[in-house]
Structure formats: C-alpha cells, structure tokens
Amino acid sequence: MLPLQNSPSSITPSSSTLSSSLSLNSTSSSSNINTSSSNQSYSIPSVNIMSNPAPITAVIMPMPVSGTQDAPFFDGTRVKNFLKQLILHSTRAGITNKDQPVDYIVKYSSADVQCIIHLQTEFDLDMSGKTWKDAEDMLVELYSAGDQPLKLMKCDIKDFCTIYSVKPRLVKKADIDQYYQTFLAVSAPLCKEKVITDTEQQYYFMQGLPTKDAKFVMTKFTDIEKKHATPPKISKVVGILNTRLEDKELLIYWEWETNEDNMDEITAHLCPHIPETHYEPECPATAARGDRGQKTVQFIN
C-alpha cells in the first residue's frame, strides 16, 4: 500500500497577512479618494465682459466753418447732394432738431445763391418756425435743373476729336491723364444714353489723340486692331502711351518736344543762324526790310 500523502492544508490567511492586506486596501482606497479629489474639476464662474461694456463716448464734430475745405458748398448745382451732405454734417455735430440745419443752407451757399434765397421765408435767418421740409422743397424747386446732366450729342464727341487731334504731343503722364479724363467726361454720357457703342467709344479715343501719339500707338496694334470696326480697348492705348514715356531709348522719343507757347521764342532765337533761303517772311514788307529774328518768320518745310 502506497503511503498516504499529506493533504494540503487549508489556505487561511494569517493575521499578519490580513492586517497587511487591510492596510494596503485602506491606503489604496485613501489614495483613490485623494486622486479623485485632486481630479475633481471646479467650475469657474464665467465673466461676461459684454454685460458691463466700457462706456462709449460719441465724438461730436462741430459744424465746419463756411468756406473751409470740409464745409458743404452750394453753387446752384447738385442740390440734392448738397442737402444730403448738410444733413450728414449736422448729425455728426450732434444736432437732434431736424429743422435746425435750415439756417446753414444760406451760410454754406455761394454769394449768388445767397442773394436769391436769403430773404425767402423758408431760409430767412431772422424768421422763426422754419422747417427743413419747406426749405428742402423750395431749394429743389429753384435749382432742379442743376441736378440734370448736360445733354450731349454725337457731334460733341466728334468736335472733341477735332480739337484734341491737332494739339501738341502728350509729353507727360499728366497730359495722358488729362486727355483720358476729358475724353470720358464727353464719351461716358453718350455711352450711357446709347448714343454711341463701346466700340465707337474706343474708336473715338484713338481719333482724338494728337497726331504724333496716334501714329506711334498704331505701330503697336495688330492688323485687326487697326480696323475701324475692331479698335483696341482704351486701357491698351493708355498703356502704350505710358510705356513710351518710360522708355527713353526709343527712337521716337523727342526730348525737344515743346508746346506752342514757346515756339515763337525758339523761332526768333534760331532765325539769325539759319540761311536766308531756308525761311520766308510772313509778308512782303518784312522781306523788303530784311528783318530777321522776328516772330513773324515762318520756316519752309
């Protein structure tokens, strides 16, 4: 018979082990509590800064002195625009009485306008009880024609081209700008009223250029752009003109280009140095006297 093996003893925790386990659990529980406490989020009361905004102080701009740069000015034209500007200035000045700006109408008007309206009951500074509506209606009634644009016709753009095409060459950027601005002042209303088309506007822009400028610009066009029916855009023409002024190496750049104001002075200065056969006096009397260096001398081409 085999010897009996000792049965394993029941596993019973000793008091020391139990004590250690309880101590560990207690420590762990305490640690968990502390950790939980440390991880607990506290809500910070939000502060709405918009609930107590900083006070905003309105900037009051006094009504400008009559005749200064910022002051409204009425000369009999664009009456509605003047009245709008006057209301805007009075609002910025903190004027809350809607009828008070009436007194400024006369103050901000030209001498000619003042002469007409200053004794009218709607504007008289010595009268009380004036209303803005009465003054506005009266002023618009008196000067309604000043708000109407000038009526232009197709012949006006042709006259423009006739006048400007014989002028001296455009020698400065300011000359180009002035030509462009003047052309638009005449042509834009015609385009808006459908008197001329956009293509015709481009065509007339070229026609109005001084002859030397037009000849130079034409050298930069394609064959299609040289046609009456397909002219180049105005912006392209202006770009070519400006490029020419910037490029001083071009053979076509004339440093001596001048205007008609000092042509007589140049002619008088050069005449004594030019052979007699190369100029002709303006009249026989001058030729008989043999005068030279006079402003009447004309060079033979």
Image (cartoon, rainbow, N blue to C red):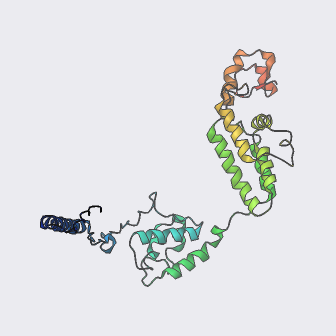
Q: Position of residue 102 (x, y in %)?
A: 46, 76
Which of the 4 image quarters holds residue 22? bottom left
Q: Position of residue 289 (x, y in %)?
A: 76, 20
Side (left or right) of 3 relative to 296: left
> Which residue occupies 44% across, 74% down?
103
On screen, residue 299 above or below 198 = above
On screen, residue 195 above or below 271 = below
Side (left or right) of 289 relative to 64: right
Side (left or right) of 143 relative to 72: right
> Which residue occupies 76% across, 37% down?
217
On screen, residue 233 above or below 140 = above
Between 22 and 215, the residue placed more toward the observer is: 22
Q: How many marks?
A: 0
Q: Where is residue 98 in the image (x, y as percent from the top left)?
A: 44, 79
Q: Where is residue 212 in the image (x, y as percent from the top left)?
A: 76, 34
> Which residue occupies 51% across, 63% down?
73
Q: Residue furthest bottom?
A: 129
> Which residue occupies 45% across, 74% down?
101
Between 281 and 80, the residue placed more toward the observer is: 80
Query: Which quarter of the rendering shows the N terminus?
Result: bottom left
Query: Which quarter of the rendering shows the C terminus?
Result: top right
